[in-house]
Amino acid sequence: MERTLAIIKPDAVAAKHTGNIIDIIENNDFNIVRMYKTKLSRDQAERFYAIHKGKSFFEELVCMMISGPIIVLALEKDGAIKAWRELMGDTNPANAAPGTIRNLYGISIGSNATHGSDSPATAVQELAFFFPDL
Ligand code: CMP
């Protein structure tokens, strides 16, 4: 089975959507392999999102990701990477399909409730970042 990294971002944790989002994850037949709550340092956030360094929204992204606690999850399912991205919906909540997590809980493109790995190579890197024992 495939694995992917999911993050419940500070905006969704602060709004107390954690339980609802975990319900959606389990109702869609993902196995939660590992999960914990943490708060990123600036250095960790900059390293995690290094691929976006130099983009206009990088500073906003880092500030948002260190603004409060996050929940990180290693999810497992057949086709987990694509399935989790579909369940999250479009990056911009304004364009996210009805019923997707970002449609339900996202506020803006910067505060969009959740993150998910975008490819098998990224999933390996991102899982190792938060779950080095996996
Ligand atoms: P995520 O899936 O975590 O991957 C990178 C994040 O950058 C993305 O979700 C958005 O939250 C954020 N992002 C992408 N584009 C913009 C933008 N134009 N303005 C602010 N944040 C953005």
Image (cartoon, rainbow, N blue to C red):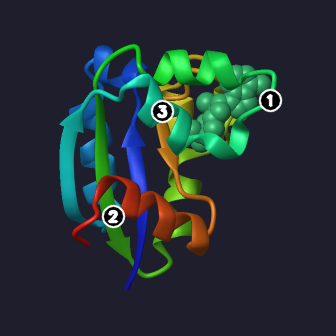
Q: Which mark is residue 55?
A: 1
The residue singled out by tag 2 in the image is 75
Residue behind label 3 places its C-beta within 8 angstroms of ligand 1:
no
Residue 115 visible: yes
**Among the two numbered marks 3 and 1 on one chain, the one whose residue lies closer to the N terminus:** 3
Q: Is 43 above or below relative to 72?
A: above
Q: Which mark is residue 82?
A: none
- At horizontal 60% and vertical 23% (from top left) the residue drawn is 61
Q: CA distance from mark 3 to mark 2?
A: 21 Å
Query: What amino acid type should be assigned to the residue bearing mark 1?
Result: Lys
**Among the two numbered marks 2 and 1 on one chain, the one whose residue lies closer to the N terminus:** 1
Q: CA distance from mark 3 to mark 1?
A: 15 Å
Q: Is 117 above or below relative to 13?
A: below
**Near-viewer residue (41 or 105):** 41
Element class at badge 1: loop
**Contact? badges 3 and 2 (CB < 8 Å):** no
- At horizontal 50% and vertical 78% (from top left) the residue drawn is 79
Q: Is 10 above or below relative to 79?
A: above
Horizontally, residue 1 falls left or right of residue 38, namely right
The residue singled out by tag 3 in the image is 45
**Contact? badges 2 and 1 (CB < 8 Å):** no
Q: Residue furthest bottom?
A: 1
Q: Quick check: which quadrant has ligand 1?
A: top right
Residue behind label 1 places its C-beta within 8 angstroms of ligand 1:
yes
Residue 94 visible: no
How many other residues sit within 10 Å of disc 3, few (<14), some (14-19) or many (≥20)? some
Q: Is 83 above or below relative to 87?
A: below
